[in-house]
Amino acid sequence: MPTLLVHLLNEDPVLGEVDEYPAMGDTVILVKNPRRKDGKDIYFLEANVTAVYWPMHRVSFIEIMPSGEEEEIIGFVRE
């Protein structure tokens, strides 16, 4: 499940997982397990919320976070 950092207009970024990356024609994005970058709860969501739909017109941009597999890859290192 890919992890995204969703930057909402006039709000702090939201970290969460998605089933698949949003397509160009999508009008909403479903973010599961929404939280702040530091892992804390989001102040404008209830404590027991597990998924949120945000309209794409509220999204400024989206960052794709590396998975555990990608972090273990060692690139070219010149010694």
Image (tube, rainbow, N blue to C red):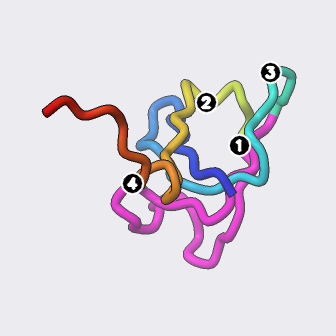
Type of amino acid under label 1: Trp
Residue bearing mark 2: 59
For the residues carrying marks 1 and 4, which lies nearer the camera in this image?
4
* 62 vs 47: above or below: above
Neighbor class of circle 4 (other Cα within 10 Å; few <14, some 14-19, many 20+) is some
Is residue 19 on the magenta stretch? no
Image quarter for residue 74?
Answer: top left
Query: How far apart, in angstroms, are the residues tagged by discs 1 and 3?
Result: 15 Å
Query: How far apart, in angstroms, are the residues tagged by discs 1 and 4?
Result: 17 Å
Is residue 30 on the magenta stretch? yes
Image quarter for residue 6?
Answer: top right
Secondary structure category for the residue under label 4: loop
Image quarter for residue 78?
Answer: top left
Point out the tag, 2 or 4, that comes first from the N-terminus.
Answer: 4
Disc number for residue 54: 1
Residue bearing mark 3: 24
* 5 vs 47: above or below: above
Which residue reaches farthest top?
A: 24
Q: Which contiguous range is marked in magenta?
A: 28-53
Type of amino acid under label 2: Val
Query: How far apart, in angstroms, are the residues tagged by discs 2 and 3?
Result: 13 Å
